[in-house]
Image: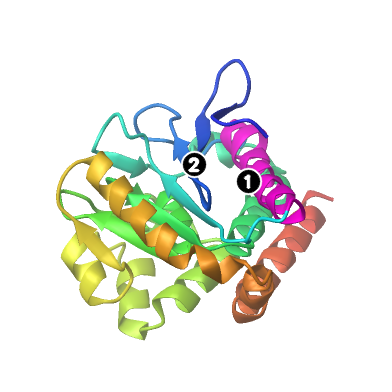
Amino acid sequence: MSFPLSLPAGQPLLTVTHPSESVWQLELHNGADSRLTRHLLQEAFLPALDAVESDWKRSLKAGGKGDAALVIVGNTKQDKFFSNGLDYENAIKQADFFPKVFNPWLARLLTFPMPTICAINGHAFAAGFLLSLMCDYRVLTAGRAWCCFNEVHFGAPLPPPFAQLIRVKLVDPQLVRKCALEGHRFVPQELLEAGVVERLVEGKSSEVLAAALELAESKASLAKTGVWGTIKEEIYREVLVAIAENRTVSRSAKL
């Protein structure tokens, strides 16, 4: 596998690099605010995850030590957004978007077989915040950045997988209520104090990314036994069941 890898070919929406022997980096650049569109998820993000895992497994077969971690960051050419969430209006017009594209992406990233570190270099709204929560660790800019699920404010119900992930990742009932029912815009210090992020970083996207890469290096050895993803399948079983059920319900509704 040759890196950098830009996907999809021709009009890339993300780029995968391999900055060190044990760390891969996925940078979103679907515009400045990295909206999570069908095209991005299906033609770029999922193939990027496959490419990273395949490269890691090839290294293992070649006698590599097996250390591995993945860092995900928003467009580093700006410092305003990590991700502005789904292209919602178009997503809800596509009957198969959630069961065929979004839910498989959720399950794939949530159980990825190496530590995943999210470098939140700006605002993370709705599915953008969800993306950060699906990762195993989070590093957040200490600057101006709101993280929230704002569905309650624009009248969109939370899909069951969203709700389950919020409950599992945030744990505290008061925090869950503020997040899901009030659409509270969390500022960096709140998320640090709640234990949702591991570290706040002063400076621009480059500093946030550097801190995430450092954290990734420190966690990479956890992948080498090959059970990281399997363990996540167990601890996030409720979320995976909700994803599977949501896919079934969506297919039934379509029929």
Residue type, numbered disc 1:
Val
Distance from Cα at disc 2 to Cα at disc 1: 9 Å
Q: Is residue 37 visible?
A: yes
The residue under the point 19% across, 41% down is 204
- Percent x, y for residue 105? 64, 51
Query: In the rendered view, does 28 fall on the left or right side of 138?
Result: right
Mark 2 touches mark 1? (CB < 8 Å): yes
Mark number, residue 24: none
Question: 31 and 201: which one is in front?
Answer: 201
| Residue farthest front in this picture | 63
Query: In the rendered view, does 65 fall on the left or right side of 155?
Result: right
Question: 215 and 148: which one is in front?
Answer: 215
Note whether 158 is above or below 26 in the view shown: below
Residue 219, magenta (yes or no): no
Main SS type for the magenta part? helix
Name the residue carrying label 2.
Answer: 26
Crowding near pointer 1: few (<14 within 10 Å), some, many (20+)? many
Mark number, residue 52: 1
Note whether 90 is above or below 107 in the view shown: above
Residue 53, magenta (yes or no): yes
Judged from the image, the secondary structure of the residue bearing numbered disc 1 is helix
Total count of labels: 2
Query: In the rendered view, does 50 fall on the left or right side of 213?
Result: right
- Percent x, y for residue 198? 30, 68
The residue under the point 37% across, 58% down is 149
Residue type, numbered disc 2:
Leu
